[in-house]
Image (cartoon, grey):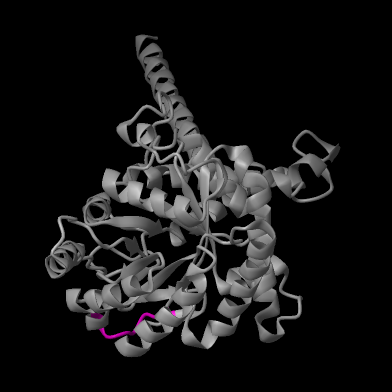
Amino acid sequence: RPQVHAVRTSLASTMFRVLLATLALASAADAMHTSAYRRPVRTSGIQASTKAAQSMPKTVKAGVVTGQALVDLLQHAKENEYAIPSVNCVSSSSINACMEAAKKYQGPMIVQFSRGGGQFFAGKAADNENDAACVAGCVAGAKMVHETAKLYGVPIILHTDHCSKAWLPWFDGLLAANEAHFAKEGKPLFSSHMLDLSEESLEDNIAICKEYLEKMKKMDILLEMELGVTGGEEDGVDNSGVDSSLLYTQPEEVWEVYKALDAVGGAFTVAAAFGNVHGVYAPGNVELRPQILHDTQKYIKEKLGTDNDKPVSFVFHGGSGSNREDIQYAIKAGVVKMNIDTDTQWSYWNGIRSYEKEFHDYLQSNLGNPEGPTKPNKKYYDPRMPLRRAEEFTAKRLGEAMEDLNSVGVCP
């Protein structure tokens, strides 16, 4: 009997350990359902009392920021060493996720549209002759943001992404929409637009940018231009096989751009390549060199003979997957905007994936689930349910980005 008792005790102890392990695994699985984030983001105690928040220019208000207010906001970011996340949006839901993150973490946000994203927003079946759907989708998204941004209580920048020389008809359509909005409202529809003429010669790149900046400055629209090439693939543009030397811009090139565009008098930023790549890659495959940006600022400061240590406002493309140290070192060199697309695409999908995993048995038919064969499932397959989970995951991922970019709590 003592042996039997010992066996029973040992068996009970083993079963108890198995039970504890099972509960631990279940708890971990449940955590994965509700969170796919790399680390917790500080939410308690966020207050608009930081030095940056206290010094926010009075021109910067809740809602869509354009013109002088945009210039003031970007200058404030540069002076206070934070940058603003910029996300390619393809639906009202992805727009909502961006503005939710901005409200929750009290920092500015950039809602941007790509050419392909604009077409998707309009509907893939829409007539796209002469980029009509690409333009209409971007315009529709921008108008939505104008209507809703103030409800979130934070400044929102409206921007469009890469536009190559072949895509200039799309860009021209966007400017026409801006002109119509400016004539009616006295301000542009979009805050800024990007021209990516990095495939052209430096001379042609500068000449075309000058031509468009002349038009844009009349409507208080900022121009973002690109120098060098952002590697990888995004939205139909594949630079994955490009010569690696093109991934790194030289200070002399930025100086030529600065001289030419500064003479025009409009507002502009420079997306200078320093090893940036679209997408997320295994460690060691991407070599960022933000020191290039520091060297460029020093070079142009000397050329100008100014006391301003950071005369150029830089843009960081391909921010997804970048480490915090590189991001913050780039910010110290005058980066005021960072694009984060791949990571937010993943977070959006991961939200949907987690929802399906959690409610899988409720998503197989109209009727019938673990609660009974005639139980209805409508409330589970309502499209709003998985999309809402996607928004929550994306907003959380953007909170992480805002921490990396030092922009949490900068809005009063």
Residue 297 in sight in this render: yes
Determine whether 47 is above or below 327 in the image: above
Residue 346 in sight in this render: no
Farthest residue in the top direction?
Answer: 2
Please give the count of numbered marks on the rendered protein.
0
Q: Is residue 396 magenta?
A: no
Give coordinates of residue 407: x percent, y percent: 37, 42
Name the side, left or right, on which 59 lies relative to 205: right
Who is closer to the viewer here, 211 or 297? 211
Q: Quadrant of residue 349?
A: bottom right
Residue found 41% across the figure and 48% down from its top? 73
Name the side, left or right, on which 215 lies relative to 298: right
Give coordinates of residue 380: x percent, y percent: 74, 42
Name the side, left or right, on which 287 lies relative to 215: left
Who is closer to the viewer here, 68 or 193? 68
Give coordinates of residue 173: x percent, y percent: 63, 77
Who is closer to the viewer here, 211 or 374? 211
Residue found 56% across the figure and 77% down from its top? 171
Who is closer to the viewer here, 140 or 75? 75
Give coordinates of residue 195: x percent, y percent: 45, 76
- Quarter of the figure that contains the C terminus: top left
Which region is colored magenta?
Answer: 238-244
Determine whether 12 is above or below 350 in the image: above
